[in-house]
Amino acid sequence: METPAADWDYLLQPEAAQLLDRFTALFGVRLGFFSPDGQGIFIGRDRRSCAYCRRLRRRPEMDRRCRAQDRRMFAAVRQRGRPIRYTCHGGLTEAVLPLEVAGRRIGFIMVGQFRTAPSRRPPPNVKPTPALRRDYSATPVFSEARTDDLLYLLERLVHFIGEHALIRRRNFDLLQPLIEAAERRPAPTWSLAEAARRIGRSPSSVSHLFKSLTGMGYRRFQIERKLDAADRLLREQPRLPVKLVAARCGFDDPLYFSRLYRRRRGRPPSAARDAAACSGAAGKSTPVRPADQRGASARRA
């Protein structure tokens, strides 16, 4: 995954490029943005893979294993929807984080190629040569504490990029007025024709744009934004009755709202409200924690 995709459907805003570049420069690690199918779109500071990885991947069987592992990690993050940290078969630490914009996962951020183990020798399965041992020992070594700091900052950076839509699908700006309006005032329910009139497009083109740019139809988008607003109210005002939460989010029937919320969120709104009241800290993010040394799984603390 060394070659950026020549024809891609994303626009990297200058601020996002600067953030990824600065992160690469600060930690001295390779950081890249990859499309949903795993194609490299942007690599911070155009940083190449480390010398150890390049030398190791000259062996065809190792190159195949690297590519297969990348695909597995992207698939695992796609399925779980959360960051994964792992140790590759070459003995280096990497992590993959999902990147979402406007409620849709548009790709991944991948960071890595550093050591967390103090050994200066690659793992035995590599069958190291003197040159491989030299290159391996030259890769950066981060303590567990520094690795946690790096991954925590990266997780917040990815959240910031997604929250501010610093990486966008082409034509995303056409829908931005509708998306912002739905976030500011989730209660009104505009018809597809009204939404199209507001941005000067035909209903069919708006329907197509929502499907292609957000991964959901226009009606589904409206429902998700209303439920997002309900999530915020339940979290920030846990004493608010469910029927008032429903009304403020544009649902005339509180029973329908409760059924819909449970179907989409996996629990009734009263349970979400009670959990927020008990914890007082719903929605806080925590850093990515280490996986086991086999790299088969990782967890988020």
Image (cartoon, rainbow, N blue to C red):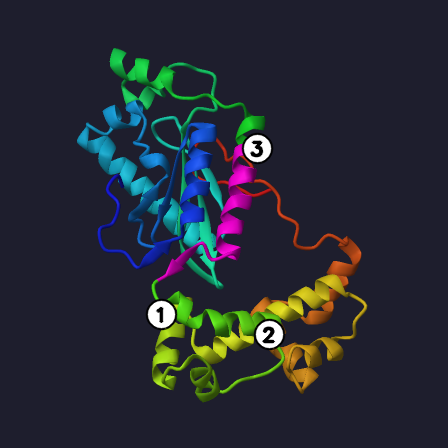
Q: Name the residue under label 3.
A: 149
Q: Does 108 sit above or below residue 31?
A: below
Which amino acid, by three-letter code, is at mark 3? Asp
Can residue 126 be seen?
yes
| Residue 44 in picture, x, y percent from top left | 37, 38
Q: Does 188 sit above or below residue 94?
A: below
| Residue 272 in picture, x, y percent from top left | 70, 64
The dot on residue 117 is: none
Q: Name the residue under label 2.
A: 226
Q: Main secondary structure of the magenta part?
A: helix
Separation of disc 1 and disc 3 at Cα?
Answer: 36 Å
Mark 1 vs 3: CB contact within 8 A: no
Which amino acid, by three-letter code, is at mark 1? Ser
Q: Name the residue under label 1.
A: 212
Q: Which residue lies at the image location 34% right of the left edge and 63% below the top edge?
A: 170
Q: Which residue lies at the image location 18% right of the left edge and 32% below the top edge?
A: 60
| Residue 49 in picture, x, y percent from top left | 31, 31
